Amino acid sequence: MDSYISVLPSEQVRRCCTVFNVIICIINVQLYLLSTAIIINCSGRTVGAYKWYTIWSFTNSNLIILFCTCLEPELLINYSPNVARGLAEYLEMPHLAMLLQVCAYVFFEINVLVMPCRFIFRYAQNTDQHHIVRFMSKKEWLCVPPALMIIFMIKGLYINRTAIEDGDQFKKEFASNDTALADYVKSHVVMYVKAYKTDVFYQNVVFPSTLIIAFICTLKCYTFQASHRASFSTRTSKLYSRLILGLALEQIILIFYIFIPIISVKCLLPKSQRHIGMFIVERILFAYPSVITLFTLLFYRQYRVALKNFLFNLRTQVSPLINPKRGKIGAIQEEISMVYRGFDIPLYTTVWMRWIDDAAKNHGLRWSDLTLAGQWKPR
């Protein structure tokens, strides 16, 4: 039995966090749709198939948070099982909790594999290794993550098929001097998700290895560029350097936004406060997809200008009618033409841009006034 009393979040705090999670999830999805449209249409030829790895990574992060929002997990940090609230409890379907848990973990596993692929692809482009770029750009290779996802899903469902029954057994045998924690555990759905040797290896070896791969790829890219052996132009070289720097900063965000808070809760807080500490940290982590999406849209100039154009056109819908002959639109046109010069990108084909087109027409503006005759035409 435990000799300490855990500090638990009150029901009011839990309800507020539920509302917060739903709002954050909606924001995550909206930013994901916007970023996907921008990345697909504004990446350009030099970025190549890398955009699909970026979208895969964003998709994984958003689906992890979406499943966690539906699950509302509450980690019993000093015990193996997890408490599941959310839809499983509301619909009185305990096995739904197991399904949501497995889905979230599967997309975590896929994301762990996609991240080193992004770094290796950037490394190959930066160091002029075309054979690696061509191989990783093949459709067959790009279909590997979906295939692995199916395999991981089957494995997870099979291994954890008795997670709810094991959780019920845990509730019956749960013994603690902390009556509040005992009552809370016994009144909710508990999942006893087993960690097999493969999962332990994946979490403790494969996952940390991605950070090592990221560091090695980044270092080799900068070493290669410093040697002045690159065969591509200065502009392309700067673009590749910007992309690898952005990836490195993504990993730094991952470390400071996820790893350090979790480790701090487990190592620095006393045992009695770890439960509520992890509860708060988990809810903050729900905003990670929005953080990383905004970083990507603002860090890279071509995406930043596209976002600026989107927001500008959005403002024209809700603001009074403006004169398209005035200088603001012309300035944005010129900036966009400089960024997308050399690319033929049909930006109007996306749902977002069709919506902007309709909004512009409602105010008497032509698409050619706003988006360079509908396409980013080369000059």
Image (cartoon, helix red, strand yellow):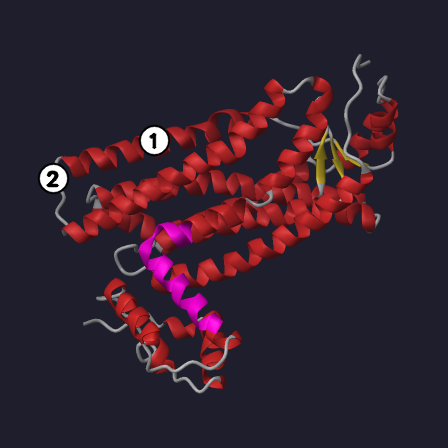
Instruction: Check disc 2: other Cα within 10 Å, few if <14, some if 14-19, many if 20+.
Output: few
Instruction: Check disc 1: other Cα within 10 Å, few if <14, some if 14-19, many if 20+.
Output: some
Q: Which region of the structure is painted magenta?
A: 296-315
Q: Residue at x 16, y 36 (%)?
A: 226
Q: Could you tell me if residue 96 is visible in this image?
A: no
**Most foreground residue, 48 or 6:** 6
**Most foreground residue, 171 or 163:** 171
Q: Residue at x 32, y 55 (%)?
A: 301
Q: Residue at x 62, y 52 (%)?
A: 25
Asked if the magenta segment contains residue 301, the reply would be: yes
Q: Position of residue 266 (x, y in %)?
A: 62, 22
Residue where numbered disc 1 is placed = 215
Tell me if residue 150 comes above or below residue 165 in the rendering.
below
Kindly identify the amino acid type of the residue bearing the numbered disc 1: Phe
Tell me if 51 is positioned left or right of 133 in this view: right
Kindly identify the amino acid type of the residue bearing the numbered disc 2: His
Circle number at residue 114: none
Q: Could you tell me if residue 129 is visible in this image?
A: yes
**Most foreground residue, 116 or 337:** 337
**Most foreground residue, 18 or 322:** 322
Tell me if residue 183 comes above or below residue 52 in the rendering.
above
Q: Main secondary structure of the magenta part?
A: helix
Q: Residue at x 36, y 77 (%)?
A: 370
How far is disc 1 from disc 2 in space, using C-alphas?
A: 21 Å
Residue where numbered disc 2 is placed = 228
Mark 1 residue element: helix
Q: Position of residue 225 (x, y in %)?
A: 18, 39
